Image: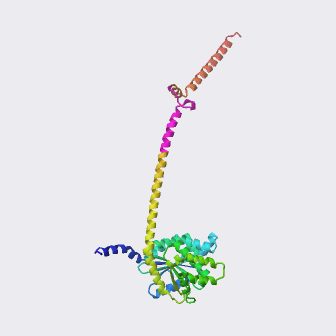
Amino acid sequence: MATAEDPEKKAEIDQPLLERHKKPVCLIVLGMAGSGKTTFVQQLTGLLHMKKKAPYVINLDPACREVPYPVNIDIRDTVNYKEVMKQYSLGPNGGIVTSLNLFATKFDQVIKLIEKKSENTEIAIFDTPGQIEVFTWSASGSIISETLGALFPTVVVYVIDTVRSVSPVTFMSNMLYACSILYKLRLPFIIVMNKIDVVSHKFALEWMKDFEMFEEAVERDKSHHANLSRSLSLTLDEFYKDITTVGFSAVTGEGFEEFLAAVDAAVVEYETEYCPEHDRLLKLQAEARTKDKDRQKKKFQHDFDNDVQAQSVSSATSEILLRNRAIGGESSSDDEEHEGRPGDDDDEEDRVGQKSFHNFLEEQKKKQQSKSNKPS
């Protein structure tokens, strides 16, 4: 039975959720070269401006010549891609990776700028390089995605070329890459089947729902990759059940509302699944650090006690050895008195030398007197 305190408790539980919803939703847009990723960002930005919901746009591609949409932050203003290639003697992909790494060192400033726009911006869009592996599997890509996921509701948008995906082998390749990105970034994930103004994406939805229909398409493909694609489709069956897929046309804007609805659902997923998991992992990391500190402290104390004990044993052994005369130690009080006067032997030698010299002088004096007493 409900009580009067239940609404208050529910409000307390939902408070962090409401606070997070006040922050802009960050969309990390990924896609293969030629998938229409940049055109998708251009169309999405324009449609959001038309709805009076201007997004905050960040370009993370240092190698692009021009950006066909208004950007708030451009990596090219911070890093000169060609100079990086020249200075570090790098190729195109190496230059992009290094440029992203340099930009990632200043990413805290990007976070501050996004936070300043939180009141007036609902969506922040991050357009990544066309070389998808450069962002997905680089250290800078992990830093950017993990930082955004920890501070803002973050959704990964993977853009696929629908026209090329008509081939079952190409479709399976895209799905495998989508699966790898999902498990690498571990963020809410949306697959956008782009270019539906040319080819409808319904065939892809049917392949994802019905394995038999995909198998029929594979049988029409006589390449040696067909059997592998058939086996992988069974493996990805669970992946298909939990993934969100929408169609979109970067030319006409078709599918825009469906995409926004998918983003809203992804934000709910972020709040209900990602955030608790993230907090749990942070707690585990904190506990691991505490245990490691305790272990190091105990090890230090143990080593310190062993050193103190070893020093005490060494001191006792040295004292015993110093008492042994055979190795130059002190053995008796007579030796102590004798060794306490190291200059006695030298004084004795001096006295003997002085007496000998005095006797020599006396002998010479007597010889002179005897000579003087002789008659001439």
Evaluate whether residue 203 shows in this view: yes
The one of 146 and 365 positioned closer to us in this rendering = 146
Task: Determine the image quadrant of residue 67.
Answer: bottom right
The one of 169 and 197 positioned closer to us in this rendering = 169
Q: Is residue 332 magenta?
A: yes
From the top left corner, tell me how far across and down residue 6 is, in percent: 31, 74
Q: Give the extent of the magenta segment.
A: 307-333
The one of 3 and 238 positioned closer to us in this rendering = 238
Q: Is residue 23 magenta?
A: no
Outermost front residue: 212
Evaluate whether residue 61 shows in this view: no
Q: Main secondary structure of the magenta part?
A: helix
From the top left corner, tell me how far across and down residue 267 is, in percent: 44, 78
From the top left corner, tell me how far across and down residue 222 is, in percent: 66, 82
Tell me if residue 108 comes above or below residue 170 in the rendering.
above
Residue sitting at x 47%, y 46%: 305
Residue sitting at x 49%, y 45%: 307
From the top left corner, tell me how far across and down residue 59 is, in percent: 53, 78
Quadrant of the rendering where the N terminus is positioned: bottom left
- Name the colour scheme: rainbow
